[in-house]
Amino acid sequence: MTRPIKQEQETASEDISEVAPGVLRAQLPVNLPGLGHVNCYILEDERGIAVIDPGLPGNDSWEALTVRLQKAGYKPENIHTAIVTHSHFDHFGGAERIREVSNADILTHEHFRNAFNSRELLESEDSNDLDPNSEEAQEQVIERIFSERLPWGSKRTMPPREEIERFKKMGRFNSSWFKTPTPTIEVSDLDTISLARREWIAIHTPGHTNDHLCLWDPDNGIMFSGDHVLPTITPHIGGISPEKDPLAKFFESLKKMTTYEGVSVALPAHGNPFINLGARATEIIEHHEERLETIRKTAVNLPDGSVNEFMKVLFSERAWGDMAESETYAHLEHLRELGELHKTEIEGISRYSIEKSR
């Protein structure tokens, strides 16, 4: 039986739509696990336009952005500000190219990362002098990605070679794919941002990433929720994070969303606009609390479990893999931080138990 497609997985529409007063949405193509598009929002004012989350690196996304801007009566040269909600490449990828053509500002949260660490796919130092498009440079990136151990001791799962070749054609193993842009404007929590004839409030919402930024327009009830709150899927909470307990931060940030009154529409980075922001944030909290309870019950009968073993309890088999392991690790570490689990390492592999945590 075919599973219904979630709205976040839908193929990018080529249409431009007004999703809130003075806010246009352009969907840019994305081919990532569980995602079919990213919403690039366009804010119009007398200076031109600001865009929020200008898509992936690479020519395909850039061409899609250019075509959609033309439909709205604009071109990349009209962009005066590129706002990046967080440091994932489907959100920041087009920002530097926009700056090259229009000298636009790049606005991020002040914690926005200017580089990924080695576990998050930085290129090998040995490849720095190579053309990033060359076969040799891409193979070095592939070797680094799939040979290095993750924080819980596992190695990344190597996809079939045909999948590797498909990713190479997309540029996914080009080291420049992962290079974050350099912000020209950095904001803190509750800073005011003047854009599109409105005053937006910056809301720091760590969890999905440590640098995640939402934007709130209290006068019109518009909340740009980025990847923090999505309409039908739960944002990935990975264990690879500058935060020692990203799930705890995520809970705090989700609870923050329930305190905003007068939200008429939430505009997510994937999927369609929705109106029940606070209720949806609560649903996501409950989803993760259910997973924590599943781990607690499993730990009673699993004296000494690895991340992989707990993952196979939390996730259905079709979802097993690196992302599921990473999210499982985040949940296990959360319980360890609460003092409910004890962690040991056996031959480099992290294992969790409840016996020694009391």
Image (cartoon, grey):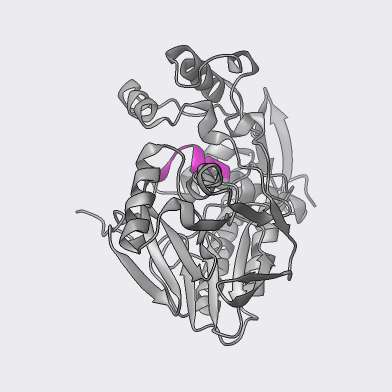
Where does the magenta region start and end?
319-326
Q: Where residue 122 sits in the image (x, y, percent)? A: 60, 28
- Residue 118: quarter of image: top right
- Place of residue 345 in the rendered image (x, y in percent of width and height, measured from the top left): 71, 30
Q: Is residue 173 left or right of residue 66?
A: right
- Residue 40 appears left or right of 228: left
Q: Residue at x 74, y 47 (%)?
A: 244
Which residue is at a point 29% across and 53% down the rendered structure image? 11
Residue 239 lies within the magenta run: no
Farthest left residue? 1
| Relative depth, front residue between 288 and 314 | 288
Observer-nearest of 30 and 103: 103
- Is residue 35 visible in the rendered image? The answer is no
Check if residue 325 falls in the magenta segment.
yes
Q: Position of residue 114 (x, y in %)?
A: 68, 40
At x 44%, y 25%, the residue is 158
In the image, residue 79 above or below residue 309 = below
Where residue 155 sits, quadrant-wise, is top right
The N terminus is located in which quarter? bottom left
From this viewpoint, is residue 146 visible?
yes
Q: Position of residue 16 (x, y in %)?
A: 32, 65
Q: Nearer the viewer, residue 291 or 271?
A: 271
Q: Tell me what residue is drawn at x 76 percent, y 52 percent.
A: 337
Magenta residues: mostly which secondary structure? helix
Q: Is residue 342 left or right of residue 237?
A: right
